[in-house]
Image (spheres, grey):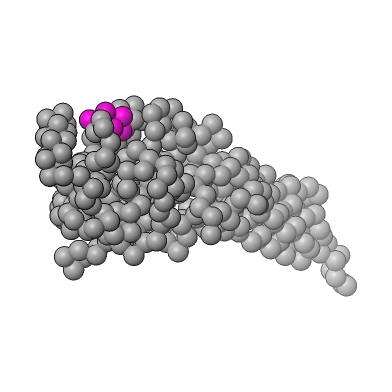
Amino acid sequence: MKFLDQVKIFLESGHGGAGCVSFRREKYIEHGGPDGGNGGKGGDIIIIAENALNTLIDYRYQQHFRAKVGGHGMGRNRTGRDAEDVILKVPVGTQIFDEDKETLLADLMEEGQRIIFLRGGDGGCGNAHYKSSTNQAPRHSTPGFPGQEMWVWLQLKLIADAGLVGLPNAGKSTFLKASSRAKPKIADYPFTTLNPQLGVVYIYDSEFVLADLPGLIEDAHLGVGLGTRFLGHAERCSVLLHLIDANAEDVVGHYHTIRHELIEYGSGLADKPEVIALNKCDSLSDEVIEEKKSLLEKESGKEVMILSAVSGQGVKEVLAALYRYILEKRDADQSQEIIEIEADPEE
């Protein structure tokens, strides 16, 4: 199935049904009075998040979704039928933006999360509604209330515990394959990965989700190479694994290129915990590796790990480092939930 993380769609909730003007007519009843029923409610536009989905490809070929109009009121005080709701299912992690692509309208972060995005119009009132002591035979009704309509952008930001970042051909897909059961495309040329890939990593009788993001390039924060869309998938990660090709002549320059893009993109990416690792170290001597490791540690001020995704060297150690940060984030989130519950006077 093709991966699609951004799409523009048109939504319109249903109009309410019109009220009815009617009078009771029966044998031997000369003045039956008004009995026009109210109109039914128009259909809502409802959006539900589901874990079973991981792409927005369903909205590639159908961009218009309209709910039906509510049924008209009828005589004998019969209310029109409410129209059926239109239900859209999206992957967990989907954000809904206004047409300007800047105003966030909804963020679906949990499985089963359900929102009534556009409410259908209420039905109009029949003439029976307007009967009063001073107006025993009203001859007017109201039309149904209109629904709502708007163009919106759906943007999917993958929910992963850890994200792989680095320049093209840094070995991110190979690392994902070595640490999980994911089967990403692997080849010896840049931009092999064109779409984000997810893999489940099993460690210490537990698991976490690792996302392989397509290779970033200079000015990715400006959208070069679809960089802004790729960086968006890293926003929800607890920790970033920054892979650097040990065969590169200027490993420090590679490091600074990615760090610059994270800083310029914003959204807190530059402040996320970061594990730095030199990949493809099986092809270099120990002296060269140690020299490049020292340069990176001096420049970044952080520990640099050594690994080879092909041979498996250092893979478990890197995963353990990532898992420590993930556990810290989970514990912090759990503590925050407890504090919020205790602070709620209704609980």
Residue drawn at the location 60% of the way across and 40% of the way down: 151
Taking depth in this image into account, of 15 and 78 the one nearest to the observer is 15
Q: Quadrant of residue 40?
A: bottom right
Indicate whether residue 277 is drawn in magenta: no
Going by the picture, which residue comes out furthest to the bottom?
Answer: 27
Position of 97 relative to 158 (above/below): above
Taking depth in this image into account, of 31 and 159 the one nearest to the observer is 159
Rendered location of residue 140, percent (x, y) = 78, 47
The residue range painted magenta reads: 252-258
Taking depth in this image into account, of 167 and 165 the one nearest to the observer is 167
Q: Is residue 143 left or right of residue 4?
A: right
Residue drawn at the location 69% of the way across and 55% of the way down: 68
Q: Is residue 172 visible?
A: yes
Rendered location of residue 228, percent (x, y) = 43, 35
Position of 232 relative to 130 (above/below): above
Q: Quadrant of residue 221?
A: top left
Indicate whether residue 253 is drawn in magenta: yes
Q: Is residue 345 visible?
A: no
Residue drawn at the location 22% of the way across and 58% of the way down: 312
- Give the main secondary structure, helix, strand or loop, of the magenta stretch: helix
Taking depth in this image into account, of 272 and 141 the one nearest to the observer is 272
Q: Quadrant of residue 70?
A: bottom right
Residue drawn at the location 26% of the way across and 54% of the way down: 309
Rendered location of residue 208, percent (x, y) = 26, 59
